[in-house]
Amino acid sequence: MIRISSETEMMDTFRPVDREEVDLPAGLKFPLVIKDYMAWVEPSGFRTFLVYEDPTSRDARGIVFRRSRPVGEPSVYMCEWCHRVSGGGAVGLLTAAAGSRHRIGLHLCRDLSCKDTIAAKPPSVNDLRESLNEQEKSSRLIRRISEFARRNLF
Ligand SMILES: [Zn+2]
């Protein structure tokens, strides 16, 4: 559980390379308590923002993702974080800045609603079948987020 006490503190969770692009959701109330992570999409849908708790350092970290424009036929993809399988643009390529000139991409739920996918009962018939329970899937999700961020971004 992370507690963010002000807008400045929220902005500080993002790396300097991302900070200019951050558009905080309207009506945020501080202090803000975040369990696992919080994600939101800017009104245009072009960027998705993520603030999560690093499980090792217990620090709050923010990432700005950009949606890549769909090319050609809509395809079906699997989210690499929660294993939701969906077409029609619900799962697609999101990229994050890895340094000032390089971006790194992942196929993810475009609104990063992975937490909700994991909690959904019953799970969607399209999703990858797994024997993990909700708690295990949820810790795997946080681990994947932080591993991705640690390896590529922070
Ligand atoms: Zn997902």
Image (cartoon, grey):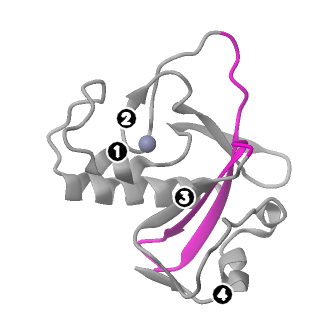
Q: Quadrant of residue 9?
A: bottom right
Q: Residues within 10 Å of mark 4 (few under 14, many from 20)?
A: some
| Residue occupied by mark 4 | 6
Q: Distance between the residues labelled 3 and 1?
A: 13 Å
Q: Distance between the residues labelled 4 and 1?
A: 29 Å
| Residue occupied by mark 1 | 117
Q: Residues within 10 Å of mark 3 (few under 14, many from 20)?
A: some
Three-letter amino acid code at disc 1? Thr
Q: In which quarter of the image is residue 105?
A: top right
The span shown in magenta is 44-72
Q: How crowded is mark 2: few (under 14 residues within 10 Å), some or many (20 or more)?
A: many
- Residues at marks 3 and 1 touching, judged by CB atoms closer than 8 Å: no
Tell me which residue sits at (70%, 52%) in the image.
Answer: 42
Three-letter amino acid code at disc 4? Ser
Disc 1 secondary structure class: helix
Disc 3 secondary structure class: strand
| Residue occupied by mark 3 | 39
User: Of discs 2 and 4, which sits in the foreground?
Assistant: 4
Give the residue furthest to the front.
27
Ligand 1 under 8 Å from disc 4 Cβ: no
Numbered label tally: 4
Q: In which quarter of the image is residue 56?
A: bottom left
Disc 4 secondary structure class: loop
